[in-house]
Image (cartoon, helix red, strand yellow):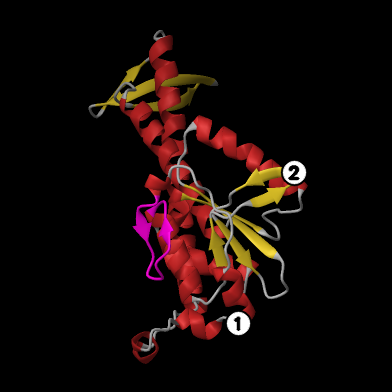
Amino acid sequence: MDIYYEIEMLQKRCERILKTERNKHSKYKRGKLHIKRINGRYQFYRFYGNKEHGIKRNRDLLEDLIRKEFTQQEIAYMEKVSEELGKLLKRLEKHYQARMVPPISDDKLLAAGMTPQDVRLTKEQVEWMNRDYERYDEHLEDLRFQTKRGLWVRSKSEQRIAERLDALGIPYIYDAKFTVNGHTKYPDFIILKPDGSYIIWEHFGMDSEKYMERNKWKIFDYAKAGYTTEYNLIITFEDSVNKNFDLVIDDLLRKYAM
């Protein structure tokens, strides 16, 4: 999981906490707690309407104002954290933009029936991509999105991933049969590295409990076969490619495949 996505998720978590705390804060009694020390003893007052009212005998009100004061401090702190995370995300965007690999575009090649990918791939890589291989053959009706290269995929995000791989000249196959530890899997993408090894790319487009439970065991099988997110397993989620798509994808590919 890339650092931009992790920070973005952390900021979203801060915003959810802020929403909860602000809602909680709105339900407290009006006024502010004032604490004074008189004759060596602490006295508690509710400051409201430009007046102070002693609340020594009203324990419920005192506790309510204390919780309100604490919540205000927590809100201020989380707002600062969210602000700093937002600044960090903007700096990362600039960093990614500076490192971003631009896609190749050549009208003459396209007019000749070639794609930029054809120019960047070796003969062996093209043969590997175009060979007959067993694909996932269930729910073929879900193949509703076609890439510029003519490949049919199951989601808009997968379409964008495939087209980015094409633009960068990275060889891959889609929905291909892949056996790990005796179990048959159909990864979304299998990328061929220059040294002949593979990178598995799984893009999870749903967040239901049943869906994630099923895929948890898939990731476990990958790990047992030596495919981990540290070296040769890319895992992305729908939220991770919605914003700054090309920047996020390029950074992942630079880490694993380029």
Question: Which residue is at 37% across, 36% downward?
Answer: 19
Residue 92 appears in the rendering: no
Question: As drawn, which residue projects farthest toward the front?
Answer: 132
Q: Quadrant of residue 251?
A: bottom right
Find disc 1 in the rendering and name its residue. 123
Q: Nearer the viewer, residue 53 or 233?
A: 233
Residue drawn at (76%, 53%) of the image: 226
Please state if 137 lies on the left or on the right of 28 as rendered.
right
Does residue 75 sit above or below 90 in this rendering? above
Foreground residue among 114 and 81: 114
| Above or below, 127 relative to 79 | below
Q: Is residue 43 visible?
A: yes
Check disc 2 and report the residue beneath it: 182
Q: Which residues are magenta?
A: 143-155
Residue at 55 percent across and 63 percent down: it is 173
Helix, strand or loop at mark 1: helix
